[in-house]
Amino acid sequence: MKNKFLYIQTFGCQMNVHDSEQIAALLKNRGYQITDNAKLADLILLNTCSIREKAAQKAYSELGRLGKLKEQNPSLIIGVGGCLAQHLGHKLHKRMRQLDLVFGTHNIHKLPDMVTDIERRRIKLTEIAFHKTVSSIGVFAEPTVGSISAFVTIMQGCNNFCAYCVVPYLRGPETSRLAEDITEEIRRLAERGIKEVTLLGQNVNSYGRTLAGNWNFTRLLKKIAEIPGILRIRFTTSHPRDLSDELIMCFAEEDKLCKHIHLPVQSGSDKILALMNRGYQVNEYMKKIDALRDVCPSISITSDIIVGFPGETANDYQETIDMMEKIRFDSTFSFKYSERKGTAAYKLTEKVDEYEKSVRLKLLQELQNRHTQEIHNSLEGSVQQVLVEGRSRNSANDLTGRASSWKIVNFAGEPDLIGTIADVKITKAYLHSLRGKLMNSQEVGDAYRNESSRFNN
Ligand code: SAH
Ligand code: SF4
Ligand code: F3S
Protein backbone atom coordinates (compact mmCIF):
# COMPACT_ATOMS: atom_id res chain seq x y z
CA MET A 1 0.00 0.00 0.00
CA LYS A 2 1.35 3.43 -0.97
CA ASN A 3 2.01 5.69 1.99
CA LYS A 4 -0.19 8.75 1.98
CA PHE A 5 -0.20 11.72 4.31
CA LEU A 6 -3.02 12.98 6.51
CA TYR A 7 -3.03 16.49 7.95
CA ILE A 8 -5.67 16.87 10.62
CA GLN A 9 -6.52 20.02 12.51
CA THR A 10 -8.70 19.90 15.60
CA PHE A 11 -10.84 22.61 17.16
CA GLY A 12 -13.07 22.47 20.23
CA CYS A 13 -13.23 20.23 23.25
CA GLN A 14 -11.38 17.14 24.43
CA MET A 15 -14.02 14.98 22.79
CA ASN A 16 -12.99 16.38 19.47
CA VAL A 17 -9.33 15.83 20.30
CA HIS A 18 -10.10 12.19 21.01
CA ASP A 19 -12.27 11.88 17.89
CA SER A 20 -9.27 13.07 15.89
CA GLU A 21 -7.13 10.36 17.48
CA GLN A 22 -9.74 7.80 16.43
CA ILE A 23 -9.90 9.25 12.91
CA ALA A 24 -6.10 8.98 12.61
CA ALA A 25 -6.28 5.35 13.82
CA LEU A 26 -8.97 4.46 11.27
CA LEU A 27 -7.16 6.07 8.38
CA LYS A 28 -3.84 4.51 9.29
CA ASN A 29 -5.40 1.21 8.21
CA ARG A 30 -5.95 2.77 4.80
CA GLY A 31 -2.33 3.79 4.41
CA TYR A 32 -2.50 7.33 5.78
CA GLN A 33 0.18 8.54 8.12
CA ILE A 34 0.01 11.80 10.04
CA THR A 35 1.98 14.83 8.89
CA ASP A 36 2.15 18.21 10.56
CA ASN A 37 2.89 19.89 7.23
CA ALA A 38 -0.35 20.62 5.33
CA LYS A 39 1.61 21.13 2.09
CA LEU A 40 2.67 17.45 2.09
CA ALA A 41 -0.84 16.14 2.69
CA ASP A 42 -2.91 13.94 0.39
CA LEU A 43 -5.84 14.32 2.75
CA ILE A 44 -6.68 17.33 4.92
CA LEU A 45 -9.32 17.01 7.61
CA LEU A 46 -10.68 19.75 9.84
CA ASN A 47 -12.38 18.47 12.97
CA THR A 48 -14.53 21.44 13.88
CA CYS A 49 -16.43 22.96 16.79
CA SER A 50 -19.60 25.03 16.75
CA ILE A 51 -20.04 25.85 20.43
CA ARG A 52 -19.63 29.60 19.89
CA GLU A 53 -19.71 31.71 16.74
CA LYS A 54 -15.98 32.39 17.14
CA ALA A 55 -15.21 28.65 16.98
CA ALA A 56 -17.13 28.38 13.72
CA GLN A 57 -15.35 31.45 12.29
CA LYS A 58 -11.95 29.93 13.08
CA ALA A 59 -12.87 26.82 11.12
CA TYR A 60 -14.04 28.86 8.12
CA SER A 61 -10.84 30.85 7.99
CA GLU A 62 -8.66 27.73 8.22
CA LEU A 63 -10.74 26.11 5.53
CA GLY A 64 -10.17 29.11 3.28
CA ARG A 65 -6.42 28.97 3.88
CA LEU A 66 -6.10 25.20 3.36
CA GLY A 67 -8.45 25.22 0.36
CA LYS A 68 -5.83 27.22 -1.55
CA LEU A 69 -3.47 24.23 -1.41
CA LYS A 70 -5.70 22.53 -3.94
CA GLU A 71 -4.50 24.97 -6.59
CA GLN A 72 -1.02 23.38 -6.43
CA ASN A 73 -2.27 19.86 -5.74
CA PRO A 74 -5.59 19.10 -7.46
CA SER A 75 -5.69 15.50 -6.19
CA LEU A 76 -5.71 16.73 -2.58
CA ILE A 77 -8.84 15.63 -0.66
CA ILE A 78 -10.31 18.07 1.86
CA GLY A 79 -12.89 17.04 4.46
CA VAL A 80 -14.70 18.70 7.35
CA GLY A 81 -15.92 16.74 10.36
CA GLY A 82 -17.07 17.49 13.90
CA CYS A 83 -19.80 19.74 15.21
CA LEU A 84 -19.76 22.43 12.52
CA ALA A 85 -20.01 19.70 9.88
CA GLN A 86 -22.92 18.18 11.78
CA HIS A 87 -24.50 21.62 12.02
CA LEU A 88 -24.22 22.68 8.37
CA GLY A 89 -24.02 19.39 6.45
CA HIS A 90 -24.09 19.77 2.66
CA LYS A 91 -24.34 23.58 2.99
CA LEU A 92 -20.59 23.50 3.62
CA HIS A 93 -20.03 22.28 0.06
CA LYS A 94 -21.85 25.35 -1.21
CA ARG A 95 -19.77 27.59 0.99
CA MET A 96 -16.54 26.13 -0.26
CA ARG A 97 -16.25 24.48 -3.64
CA GLN A 98 -12.83 22.90 -2.89
CA LEU A 99 -14.44 20.72 -0.25
CA ASP A 100 -14.80 16.98 -1.00
CA LEU A 101 -16.23 15.54 2.15
CA VAL A 102 -18.46 16.43 5.10
CA PHE A 103 -18.87 13.92 7.92
CA GLY A 104 -20.87 14.42 11.10
CA THR A 105 -20.22 13.44 14.70
CA HIS A 106 -21.83 9.99 14.37
CA ASN A 107 -20.06 9.02 11.17
CA ILE A 108 -16.39 8.83 11.97
CA HIS A 109 -16.41 5.08 11.35
CA LYS A 110 -17.61 5.68 7.78
CA LEU A 111 -14.74 7.99 6.99
CA PRO A 112 -12.29 5.40 5.56
CA ASP A 113 -14.83 4.15 3.01
CA MET A 114 -15.82 7.69 2.11
CA VAL A 115 -12.20 8.64 1.53
CA THR A 116 -11.58 5.54 -0.61
CA ASP A 117 -14.71 6.32 -2.62
CA ILE A 118 -13.49 9.86 -3.28
CA GLU A 119 -10.01 8.62 -4.23
CA ARG A 120 -11.60 6.37 -6.87
CA ARG A 121 -14.46 8.46 -8.18
CA ARG A 122 -13.68 12.07 -7.23
CA ILE A 123 -17.22 12.68 -6.00
CA LYS A 124 -18.42 15.00 -3.24
CA LEU A 125 -19.85 13.25 -0.17
CA THR A 126 -21.85 14.24 2.92
CA GLU A 127 -22.75 11.94 5.80
CA ILE A 128 -24.43 13.48 8.83
CA ALA A 129 -27.12 10.96 9.86
CA PHE A 130 -27.42 10.11 13.56
CA HIS A 131 -27.20 6.43 14.53
CA LYS A 132 -28.56 4.75 17.61
CA THR A 133 -25.28 3.16 18.51
CA VAL A 134 -22.33 5.14 17.38
CA SER A 135 -19.88 2.60 16.01
CA SER A 136 -16.98 5.01 16.22
CA ILE A 137 -17.27 5.30 20.00
CA GLY A 138 -15.21 2.13 20.45
CA VAL A 139 -12.53 2.71 17.82
CA PHE A 140 -9.21 1.95 19.49
CA ALA A 141 -6.78 4.82 19.07
CA GLU A 142 -3.32 3.30 19.47
CA PRO A 143 -1.42 5.65 21.82
CA THR A 144 1.63 7.28 20.31
CA VAL A 145 4.93 5.85 21.53
CA GLY A 146 5.89 7.30 24.90
CA SER A 147 2.51 8.77 25.77
CA ILE A 148 1.49 8.44 29.39
CA SER A 149 -2.06 9.71 29.35
CA ALA A 150 -5.06 8.84 27.16
CA PHE A 151 -8.68 9.81 26.66
CA VAL A 152 -11.41 7.19 26.87
CA THR A 153 -14.97 7.94 25.77
CA ILE A 154 -17.49 6.55 28.23
CA MET A 155 -20.60 8.16 26.82
CA GLN A 156 -21.68 10.43 24.03
CA GLY A 157 -24.37 13.01 23.42
CA CYS A 158 -26.34 15.03 25.93
CA ASN A 159 -29.98 15.27 27.01
CA ASN A 160 -29.68 18.39 29.13
CA PHE A 161 -30.55 21.08 26.61
CA CYS A 162 -29.05 23.99 28.50
CA ALA A 163 -30.70 26.97 26.84
CA TYR A 164 -27.50 28.34 25.25
CA CYS A 165 -25.96 25.09 24.04
CA VAL A 166 -25.81 23.40 20.64
CA VAL A 167 -24.21 20.16 21.84
CA PRO A 168 -27.43 18.10 22.26
CA TYR A 169 -28.35 18.94 18.65
CA LEU A 170 -24.90 18.15 17.28
CA ARG A 171 -23.85 15.12 19.31
CA GLY A 172 -27.30 13.53 19.65
CA PRO A 173 -28.99 11.92 22.66
CA GLU A 174 -27.02 10.71 25.65
CA THR A 175 -25.82 7.13 25.26
CA SER A 176 -23.50 5.28 27.65
CA ARG A 177 -20.93 2.84 26.41
CA LEU A 178 -20.89 -0.67 27.87
CA ALA A 179 -18.72 -0.89 30.99
CA GLU A 180 -16.94 -4.03 29.78
CA ASP A 181 -15.95 -2.31 26.53
CA ILE A 182 -14.59 0.64 28.48
CA THR A 183 -12.56 -1.49 30.90
CA GLU A 184 -11.29 -3.65 28.03
CA GLU A 185 -10.07 -0.53 26.20
CA ILE A 186 -8.34 0.75 29.35
CA ARG A 187 -6.66 -2.63 29.85
CA ARG A 188 -5.27 -2.41 26.32
CA LEU A 189 -4.08 1.13 26.96
CA ALA A 190 -2.38 0.06 30.21
CA GLU A 191 -0.59 -2.76 28.35
CA ARG A 192 0.83 -0.10 26.01
CA GLY A 193 2.23 1.98 28.87
CA ILE A 194 -0.64 4.37 29.56
CA LYS A 195 -0.68 5.39 33.25
CA GLU A 196 -3.50 7.92 33.33
CA VAL A 197 -6.93 7.89 31.71
CA THR A 198 -9.35 10.78 31.35
CA LEU A 199 -12.91 9.54 31.01
CA LEU A 200 -14.87 11.64 28.55
CA GLY A 201 -18.55 12.49 28.34
CA GLN A 202 -20.67 15.65 28.27
CA ASN A 203 -22.13 14.69 31.62
CA VAL A 204 -20.25 11.73 33.08
CA ASN A 205 -22.28 11.79 36.29
CA SER A 206 -25.26 10.38 34.45
CA TYR A 207 -23.23 7.44 33.13
CA GLY A 208 -25.26 4.24 33.05
CA ARG A 209 -28.72 5.75 32.65
CA THR A 210 -29.11 4.17 29.25
CA LEU A 211 -27.62 0.81 30.31
CA ALA A 212 -29.13 -2.31 31.86
CA GLY A 213 -27.70 -3.68 35.12
CA ASN A 214 -27.59 -0.79 37.59
CA TRP A 215 -24.50 0.85 36.26
CA ASN A 216 -23.57 4.28 37.51
CA PHE A 217 -20.46 6.40 37.27
CA THR A 218 -19.08 5.51 40.71
CA ARG A 219 -19.36 1.81 40.01
CA LEU A 220 -17.55 2.32 36.72
CA LEU A 221 -14.78 4.33 38.42
CA LYS A 222 -14.20 1.56 40.95
CA LYS A 223 -13.95 -1.04 38.19
CA ILE A 224 -11.42 1.08 36.32
CA ALA A 225 -9.37 1.62 39.48
CA GLU A 226 -8.83 -2.17 39.63
CA ILE A 227 -7.04 -2.24 36.28
CA PRO A 228 -3.32 -2.97 36.80
CA GLY A 229 -0.92 -0.32 35.51
CA ILE A 230 -3.40 2.56 35.68
CA LEU A 231 -2.11 4.99 38.30
CA ARG A 232 -4.53 7.85 37.82
CA ILE A 233 -8.09 8.49 36.72
CA ARG A 234 -9.59 11.81 35.69
CA PHE A 235 -12.97 12.64 34.19
CA THR A 236 -14.68 15.48 32.41
CA THR A 237 -17.29 16.99 32.43
CA SER A 238 -19.63 16.83 35.39
CA HIS A 239 -23.02 18.47 35.63
CA PRO A 240 -23.49 19.94 39.14
CA ARG A 241 -27.07 18.72 39.37
CA ASP A 242 -26.03 15.09 38.93
CA LEU A 243 -22.95 15.10 41.16
CA SER A 244 -23.85 12.43 43.72
CA ASP A 245 -22.71 12.13 47.36
CA GLU A 246 -21.36 8.71 46.39
CA LEU A 247 -19.08 10.28 43.78
CA ILE A 248 -18.03 13.05 46.17
CA MET A 249 -16.92 10.32 48.64
CA CYS A 250 -14.71 8.77 45.95
CA PHE A 251 -12.40 11.79 46.27
CA ALA A 252 -11.65 10.63 49.81
CA GLU A 253 -11.69 6.90 49.24
CA GLU A 254 -10.33 6.22 45.80
CA ASP A 255 -6.57 6.82 45.71
CA LYS A 256 -6.30 6.65 41.94
CA LEU A 257 -8.92 9.36 41.40
CA CYS A 258 -7.12 12.67 40.90
CA LYS A 259 -7.98 15.44 43.32
CA HIS A 260 -9.53 17.70 40.73
CA ILE A 261 -13.05 18.29 39.53
CA HIS A 262 -14.21 20.44 36.63
CA LEU A 263 -17.70 21.50 37.64
CA PRO A 264 -19.14 24.13 35.30
CA VAL A 265 -21.33 26.59 37.21
CA GLN A 266 -22.08 29.02 34.30
CA SER A 267 -23.52 31.81 36.49
CA GLY A 268 -23.87 32.96 40.10
CA SER A 269 -27.42 34.26 39.63
CA ASP A 270 -30.41 32.02 40.30
CA LYS A 271 -32.45 33.98 37.78
CA ILE A 272 -29.89 33.36 35.03
CA LEU A 273 -29.37 29.71 36.00
CA ALA A 274 -33.13 29.17 35.63
CA LEU A 275 -33.15 30.91 32.23
CA MET A 276 -30.21 28.71 31.24
CA ASN A 277 -32.20 25.61 32.25
CA ARG A 278 -29.34 24.35 34.41
CA GLY A 279 -31.53 22.65 37.02
CA TYR A 280 -29.79 23.90 40.19
CA GLN A 281 -29.53 27.06 42.27
CA VAL A 282 -26.38 28.79 43.48
CA ASN A 283 -26.77 27.59 47.09
CA GLU A 284 -27.09 23.98 45.90
CA TYR A 285 -23.90 24.39 43.88
CA MET A 286 -22.11 25.89 46.89
CA LYS A 287 -23.23 22.96 49.06
CA LYS A 288 -21.63 20.53 46.61
CA ILE A 289 -18.41 22.55 46.73
CA ASP A 290 -18.47 22.46 50.55
CA ALA A 291 -19.08 18.70 50.51
CA LEU A 292 -16.17 18.17 48.10
CA ARG A 293 -13.85 20.27 50.28
CA ASP A 294 -15.06 18.49 53.42
CA VAL A 295 -14.06 15.07 52.14
CA CYS A 296 -10.97 16.28 50.28
CA PRO A 297 -9.57 19.60 51.53
CA SER A 298 -6.86 19.77 48.85
CA ILE A 299 -9.25 19.26 45.94
CA SER A 300 -8.75 21.60 43.02
CA ILE A 301 -12.01 22.97 41.59
CA THR A 302 -12.28 24.45 38.11
CA SER A 303 -15.33 25.73 36.30
CA ASP A 304 -16.89 27.30 33.20
CA ILE A 305 -18.67 30.66 33.33
CA ILE A 306 -20.70 32.50 30.69
CA VAL A 307 -21.13 36.28 30.91
CA GLY A 308 -23.77 38.31 29.12
CA PHE A 309 -26.46 35.66 28.84
CA PRO A 310 -29.72 37.37 27.75
CA GLY A 311 -31.31 39.11 30.74
CA GLU A 312 -28.05 39.24 32.77
CA THR A 313 -28.21 42.60 34.58
CA ALA A 314 -25.27 44.29 36.32
CA ASN A 315 -26.73 42.86 39.49
CA ASP A 316 -26.82 39.27 38.18
CA TYR A 317 -23.23 39.69 37.02
CA GLN A 318 -22.24 40.97 40.47
CA GLU A 319 -23.77 37.80 41.94
CA THR A 320 -21.42 35.74 39.76
CA ILE A 321 -18.46 37.79 41.01
CA ASP A 322 -19.62 37.39 44.63
CA MET A 323 -19.93 33.63 44.14
CA MET A 324 -16.40 33.50 42.71
CA GLU A 325 -15.10 35.43 45.72
CA LYS A 326 -16.74 32.90 48.03
CA ILE A 327 -15.66 29.77 46.16
CA ARG A 328 -12.25 30.84 44.84
CA PHE A 329 -11.92 28.45 41.90
CA ASP A 330 -8.47 27.16 41.00
CA SER A 331 -9.17 28.27 37.46
CA THR A 332 -12.10 28.96 35.15
CA PHE A 333 -12.81 28.96 31.44
CA SER A 334 -14.97 32.00 30.85
CA PHE A 335 -16.80 33.05 27.71
CA LYS A 336 -18.98 35.81 26.34
CA TYR A 337 -22.41 34.40 25.59
CA SER A 338 -22.61 33.57 21.90
CA GLU A 339 -26.01 33.35 20.32
CA ARG A 340 -26.64 30.00 18.59
CA LYS A 341 -29.52 29.61 16.21
CA GLY A 342 -31.91 26.78 17.13
CA THR A 343 -31.22 26.90 20.89
CA ALA A 344 -33.87 28.02 23.40
CA ALA A 345 -31.89 31.14 24.38
CA TYR A 346 -31.88 32.33 20.77
CA LYS A 347 -35.47 33.47 21.27
CA LEU A 348 -34.72 35.54 24.38
CA THR A 349 -34.94 39.22 23.54
CA GLU A 350 -33.14 40.99 26.41
CA LYS A 351 -29.69 40.85 24.80
CA VAL A 352 -26.60 42.20 26.52
CA ASP A 353 -24.55 44.67 24.51
CA GLU A 354 -21.28 43.23 23.06
CA TYR A 355 -19.12 45.93 24.62
CA GLU A 356 -20.72 45.33 28.02
CA LYS A 357 -20.04 41.59 27.65
CA SER A 358 -16.37 42.31 26.94
CA VAL A 359 -16.05 44.52 30.02
CA ARG A 360 -17.71 41.88 32.22
CA LEU A 361 -15.48 39.14 30.84
CA LYS A 362 -12.29 41.15 31.32
CA LEU A 363 -13.07 41.99 34.96
CA LEU A 364 -14.07 38.42 35.70
CA GLN A 365 -10.86 37.08 34.18
CA GLU A 366 -8.76 39.55 36.15
CA LEU A 367 -10.43 38.37 39.36
CA GLN A 368 -9.86 34.73 38.39
CA ASN A 369 -6.19 35.37 37.63
CA ARG A 370 -5.81 36.94 41.05
CA HIS A 371 -7.40 33.89 42.71
CA THR A 372 -5.33 31.44 40.66
CA GLN A 373 -2.09 33.25 41.47
CA GLU A 374 -2.95 33.39 45.19
CA ILE A 375 -3.82 29.68 45.29
CA HIS A 376 -0.58 28.87 43.45
CA ASN A 377 1.43 31.05 45.84
CA SER A 378 -0.04 29.13 48.77
CA LEU A 379 1.35 25.91 47.26
CA GLU A 380 4.97 27.11 47.49
CA GLY A 381 6.78 24.78 49.89
CA SER A 382 4.23 21.97 49.46
CA VAL A 383 5.11 18.55 48.04
CA GLN A 384 3.14 17.56 44.94
CA GLN A 385 2.89 14.12 43.37
CA VAL A 386 3.62 14.73 39.71
CA LEU A 387 2.93 12.23 36.97
CA VAL A 388 5.86 12.95 34.68
CA GLU A 389 4.70 13.24 31.08
CA GLY A 390 7.90 14.12 29.27
CA ARG A 391 10.60 16.67 28.72
CA SER A 392 9.64 20.31 29.01
CA ARG A 393 9.40 22.15 25.71
CA ASN A 394 11.07 25.21 27.19
CA SER A 395 14.21 23.71 28.67
CA ALA A 396 16.16 20.58 27.75
CA ASN A 397 17.03 19.75 31.37
CA ASP A 398 13.49 20.05 32.62
CA LEU A 399 10.71 17.52 32.92
CA THR A 400 7.05 18.40 32.90
CA GLY A 401 3.97 16.75 34.31
CA ARG A 402 0.80 17.36 36.23
CA ALA A 403 0.06 17.30 39.92
CA SER A 404 -3.05 15.43 41.04
CA SER A 405 -4.75 18.86 40.99
CA TRP A 406 -4.15 19.09 37.19
CA LYS A 407 -1.68 21.92 37.68
CA ILE A 408 1.39 21.80 35.46
CA VAL A 409 4.67 21.31 37.34
CA ASN A 410 8.12 21.75 35.77
CA PHE A 411 11.32 20.60 37.45
CA ALA A 412 14.87 19.50 36.66
CA GLY A 413 15.19 15.72 36.38
CA GLU A 414 16.36 12.72 34.38
CA PRO A 415 14.13 11.28 31.62
CA ASP A 416 13.96 7.87 33.36
CA LEU A 417 11.32 9.48 35.58
CA ILE A 418 8.91 9.80 32.63
CA GLY A 419 5.82 7.71 33.31
CA THR A 420 6.37 7.61 37.07
CA ILE A 421 4.90 9.68 39.87
CA ALA A 422 7.60 11.93 41.34
CA ASP A 423 7.53 13.88 44.61
CA VAL A 424 8.27 17.48 43.79
CA LYS A 425 8.61 20.35 46.24
CA ILE A 426 7.11 23.55 44.83
CA THR A 427 9.62 26.38 44.80
CA LYS A 428 7.94 29.01 42.62
CA ALA A 429 4.34 29.73 41.66
CA TYR A 430 3.35 31.18 38.29
CA LEU A 431 -0.10 31.87 36.91
CA HIS A 432 -0.17 28.92 34.52
CA SER A 433 2.31 26.52 36.11
CA LEU A 434 4.38 25.67 39.16
CA ARG A 435 8.11 25.18 39.37
CA GLY A 436 9.59 22.64 41.74
CA LYS A 437 12.53 20.60 42.90
CA LEU A 438 12.64 16.82 42.80
CA MET A 439 12.87 15.40 46.31
CA ASN A 440 15.14 12.51 47.23
CA SER A 441 13.76 9.63 49.30
CA GLN A 442 15.17 11.02 52.58
CA GLU A 443 13.44 14.37 51.97
CA VAL A 444 10.19 12.63 51.01
CA GLY A 445 10.23 10.67 54.28
CA ASP A 446 10.85 13.87 56.28
CA ALA A 447 8.11 15.71 54.42
CA TYR A 448 5.56 12.99 55.17
CA ARG A 449 6.59 12.85 58.82
CA ASN A 450 6.16 16.63 59.08
CA GLU A 451 2.78 16.47 57.36
CA SER A 452 1.51 13.72 59.65
CA SER A 453 2.80 15.39 62.84
CA ARG A 454 1.06 18.60 61.73
CA PHE A 455 -2.08 16.58 61.14
CA ASN A 456 -1.88 14.78 64.51
CA ASN A 457 -1.27 17.90 66.60
N1 SAH B 1 -20.90 19.45 28.61
C1 SAH B 1 -20.10 20.36 29.23
C2 SAH B 1 -19.70 21.60 28.48
C3 SAH B 1 -19.74 21.66 27.05
S1 SAH B 1 -19.40 23.17 26.30
C4 SAH B 1 -20.83 20.83 30.43
O1 SAH B 1 -22.02 20.88 30.44
O2 SAH B 1 -20.16 21.14 31.36
C5 SAH B 1 -18.15 23.95 27.25
C6 SAH B 1 -18.54 25.28 27.78
O3 SAH B 1 -18.80 26.19 26.73
C7 SAH B 1 -19.81 25.29 28.61
O4 SAH B 1 -19.62 24.86 29.92
C8 SAH B 1 -20.20 26.75 28.55
O5 SAH B 1 -19.61 27.49 29.58
C9 SAH B 1 -19.64 27.22 27.21
N2 SAH B 1 -20.70 27.46 26.23
C10 SAH B 1 -21.56 26.58 25.70
N3 SAH B 1 -22.40 27.20 24.85
C11 SAH B 1 -22.06 28.50 24.84
C12 SAH B 1 -22.57 29.66 24.16
N4 SAH B 1 -23.60 29.60 23.34
N5 SAH B 1 -21.97 30.85 24.41
C13 SAH B 1 -20.92 30.95 25.24
N6 SAH B 1 -20.41 29.89 25.91
C14 SAH B 1 -20.97 28.68 25.72
FE1 SF4 C 1 -24.35 21.70 26.64
FE2 SF4 C 1 -25.57 21.67 28.97
FE3 SF4 C 1 -25.17 19.38 27.65
FE4 SF4 C 1 -23.11 20.65 28.72
S1 SF4 C 1 -24.82 19.75 29.83
S2 SF4 C 1 -23.23 19.79 26.68
S3 SF4 C 1 -23.66 22.77 28.48
S4 SF4 C 1 -26.47 21.07 27.01
FE1 F3S D 1 -17.42 22.09 20.25
FE2 F3S D 1 -18.79 19.98 19.66
FE3 F3S D 1 -17.09 19.90 21.65
S1 F3S D 1 -19.54 22.04 19.62
S2 F3S D 1 -17.15 21.97 22.41
S3 F3S D 1 -16.60 20.21 19.54
S4 F3S D 1 -19.02 18.84 21.53
Image: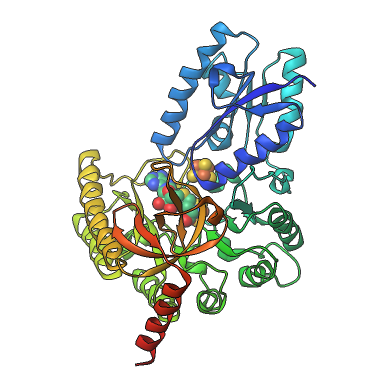
Q: Is residue 293 left or right of residue 227?
A: left
Q: Looking at this rendering, what residue extends furthest in the bottom direction?
A: 457
Q: Is residue 344 left or right of residue 167?
A: left
Residue displayed at 21% across by 60% down: 318
Count of numbered marks:
0
Residue 224, x across and y down, in percent: 67, 66
Residue 183 sits in which quadrant? bottom right
Which residue is more in the foreground, 26 or 147? 147
Q: What is the residue that sits farthest to the right in this orientation?
A: 1
x, y (%) of residue 238? Answer: 50, 62
Q: Is residue 445 visible?
A: yes
User: Vertically, is 88 above or below 286?
Assistant: above
Quadrant position of residue 420? bottom right
Residue shown at the point (33%, 65%) measured from the top left: 270
212 lies above or below 457: above
Q: How is the image coloured?
A: rainbow
Q: Position of residue 436 (x, y in %)?
A: 36, 59
Quarter holding the C terminus is: bottom left
Query: In this orientation, which residue lies closer to the viewer: 258 or 100?
Result: 258
Quadrant in the picture for residue 94: top right
Pick whichever, 373 or 64, lies toward us: 373
Residue occupying the point 58% across, 19% down: 93
Q: Position of residue 61 (x, y in %)?
A: 43, 23
Residue 163 visible, this angle: no
Q: Is residue 242 left or right of residue 375?
A: right
Q: The N terminus is located in which quarter?
A: top right
